[in-house]
Image (spheres, rainbow, N blue to C red):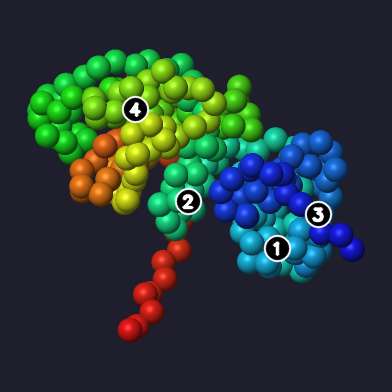
Amino acid sequence: MAIASLPKGSGGPRYMALARQLAKEIRKGKYPVDTLLPTEAELTTKYGLSRFTVREAIRQLQSQGLVLRRQGVGTRVLTEEPIHHFLQSRNSVEEVLQYGVQSLLKEMAMTKVKADAGLAERIRCAEGEKFLKIEGLRMPVDNPSGLPVCWTEIFVLSEFAGIKDQVGRGNVLIANLIEDRYDKRAIEIHQDITAVSFPGDIAQKLGVRSGSPGLLVRRWYMGSDDRAFEITVSLHPGESFSYSMRMRRDAET
């Protein structure tokens, strides 16, 4: 039996590529609603992937509300269109950098800003630091006219502002634009997640109630000089965001 190949150029971990392929086949009706997907063993054989990779792909589909997996029954298709419950599962800098290619920036605005005391405290930068600020809605690549993933603000150090003409051309991550143009690479990414209430203006953009719960996700993209060259602040509806990670103990030497 010939091994089926996943679309070339899909990028990212193999389980994400498989999840996208299966979601596409569900949308096209290959696996109708209320039928079962092929078993893990069948998918493993068909695509030449490990059982772990197939299982992770199914988890991605389940997090989107496309399928329901039940032990002893199988994985049943629930709907053709994902419920945009945005799951992040990140284990390395490379996987974090895949986040940007899973969404598109929409309704963007770009301005030059100088950090006052309030902004400096909010994004943990030096007061007086100058940035190119990019803000807008992040939309899912597979449904760009659907519900937004989040509202995001991106602060790029002014010395890298030359990337502004390339922003918004497809689903290219800002950090990758900076790396390509300036050879400035993210060595580490720091992140924190805080529970907040939605302010009225952003709530309206995301189609949620003012004051409803949300999650504020801040990221600092650190260069080899231990300085953040890009800072992102994203606000997600609380009911449509979850975050998971795997941690492994370093081998003893």
Question: In the rendering, at what x and y percent does residue 106 appear?
Answer: 49, 20
| Kind of residue indicated by mark 1 | Leu
- The numbered mark at residue 49 is 1
Instruction: State left or right for residue 153 relative to residue 7.
Output: left
Q: CA distance from mark 4 to mark 2?
A: 20 Å
Residue 71 vertical position relative to residue 57 in the rendered view, above or below? below
Q: Residues within 10 Å of mark 3 (few under 14, many from 20)?
A: few
Name which residue type carries label 3. Answer: Ala
Residue depicted at x 31% and y 51%: 188
List x then y, in percent, for residue 117. Answer: 10, 28
Residue 203 visible in this rendered orientation of the protein: no
| Earlier residue among tags 4 and 1 | 1
Chain-order first, disc 2 or disc 3? 3
Dividing the picture into quadrants, the one containing residue 114 is top left
Reading the image, the residue beneath label 3 is: 4
Circles 4 and 3: CB atoms closer than 8 Å: no
Which residue is depicted at the point 48% across and 28% down?
138
**C-alpha separation, residue under disc 1 versus residue under disc 3:** 10 Å
Dot 1 lies on which element?
Answer: loop
What residue type is disc 4 on? Glu
Q: Is residue 220 left or right of residue 67?
A: left
Split into 4 quadrants, where in the image is the N terminus? bottom right
Label 4: element kind: strand
